[in-house]
Amino acid sequence: MSSIQSYISDNKDRFLSELIELLKIPSISADSAYKNDVLKTAEVIKDSLINAGCDHVEVCQTDGYPIVYGEKIIDPNLPIVLVYGHYDVQPPDPLDLWDSPPFEPIIKNTELHPEGAIFARGACDDKGQMYMHVKALEYMTTEGELPCNVKFMIEGEEEVGSENLGHFVKANREKLENDVILISDTGMIAKDVPSITTGLRGLSYVEVEVTGPNRDLHSGLYGGAVANPINVLTKMIASLHDENNHITIPGFYDNVENLSDVERAEMAKAPFSLENYKKALDIDAVYGEEGYTTNERNSIRPTLDVNGIWGGYTGEGAKTVIASKAYAKISMRLVPNQDWGDITHLFKTHFESIAPAGVRVKVTPHHGGQGYVTPIDSLGYKAAAKAYEQTFGKTPIPQRSGGSIPIVSLFEEELKSKTILMGFGLDSDAIHSPNEHFGVWNYLKGIETIPHFYKYFTELKK
């Protein structure tokens, strides 16, 4: 492993240019207009895995977008690490808030990234972090130091719920057999404070539709006489939280895991500046469930948020109408022990029950998944900790993430193996937001650290 820093230094420009070319492809899985771009990206990933040294690579078709599978088997008796990532990205909207076009990657220096950061949709989530693993394998096969077997499973539907991945995993248990699953789709506390994500929240994502009159109406002739779906929808949404920002859906908290005071005290040891947090977001106060800190609200507590709301006339100028319909998209982030199917049912039942007379309500579930907690005494966690210690010079801090990777719990159920979440992004990297970026230092540090995980995991398995 002593030569890895030299290898990265010698190939830095190529590593960056390859990632930039990958980021230029708008692989937006949520928008069918970009279907050909998503498919093109799968082919690029296939070629990248071949060039990195995989002996077998295939683009596996599904009912949706394909899954790219690759493997490098050096000895059947050695451990197998399965790397998971995704090549699809979020829609870049709103485009007017980007400082540079989302699919024209540019490297710019920032306060947190004085060495430069790559600005583009997918830079951190997840093309940049996924591609670290491809380049790490390239190093290990080029230098002849690969200590174990490696498999890759890179999908194209993570941002729309990974619906077809579950079918693929269940149908290919033998192909995907492994000793540990490695994912880089999370972050770390800071560049000088490495951390390993030990928990993920689950997710329930729904769309609601409120229908009133059978057509848009003149607001002067009909205003005050018929229910306005937009007014009704906003009132219904507002009622989903009480004055303490506690979610009011009956039964919502029944299975919520409540951490002990000792566990909460351990969490509080992680470095965190509330003032820096507010400054970075340009807000003068934080907001959330009463009785919990900011870091607890966004990791160990469930939430309910409106992700989009629309209806009526939103064009230029005025059009005085009462809309026939109003819509909203709502996501609920869940903690371990909350079943996303149960929560979706509770939401649907409750939301329909609070609709006043004069409107009809339709709730359409989209996708979801379970939360996940990984133990810190597993061989995978220990190997990851030793890898970070090797490259960062300090022991990583275990932390729970507020994000969701629904397929992680599926992996454990179907493949019977633990997942290790080695993320190298930062909370400030604006994933899912305008001006998403990924630090050049973070990208290269991931490539440097990943090979050490393989080394230490293999040693611990002996």
Image (cartoon, rainbow, N blue to C red):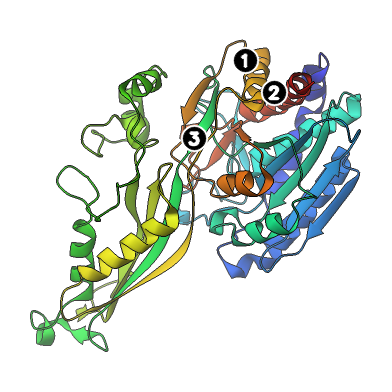
| Element carrying mark 2 | helix
Measured in 3D between alpha carbons, the distance from the residue under mark 3 to the one under mark 1, in whole angstroms, is 22 Å
Q: Which mark is residue 93?
A: none
In this rendering, the count of numbered labels is 3
Measured in 3D between alpha carbons, the distance from the residue under mark 2 to the one under mark 1, in whole angstroms, is 9 Å
Please report contact status of discs 2 and 1: CB closer than 8 Å, yes or no.
yes
Could you tell me residue 395's position as x and y percent? 57, 13
Measured in 3D between alpha carbons, the distance from the residue under mark 2 to the one under mark 3, in whole angstroms, is 21 Å
Q: Is residue 131 left or right of residue 219?
A: right
Q: Is residue 367 above or below residue 265?
A: below
Could you tell me residue 173's position as x and y percent? 74, 51
Quarter of the view holding residue 288: top left
Between label 3 and label 1, give the one nearer the viewer.
3
Position of the N terminus by quadrant: top right
- Residue found at x 66% / y 16%: 386
Q: Amino acid at mark 3?
A: Gly
Position of the C terminus by quadrant: top right
Q: Earlier in the sequence, mark 2 or mark 3?
A: 3
Q: Which residue is mark 2?
A: 449
Q: Is residue 273 above or below residue 95?
A: above
| Element carrying mark 1 | helix
Between label 2 and label 3, give the one nearer the viewer.
3
Q: Is residue 150 above or below residue 404?
A: above
Q: Which mark is residue 392?
A: 1
Q: Earlier in the sequence, mark 2 or mark 1?
A: 1
Could you tell me residue 228's position as x and y percent? 18, 76
Q: Which mark is residue 199?
A: 3
| Element carrying mark 3 | strand
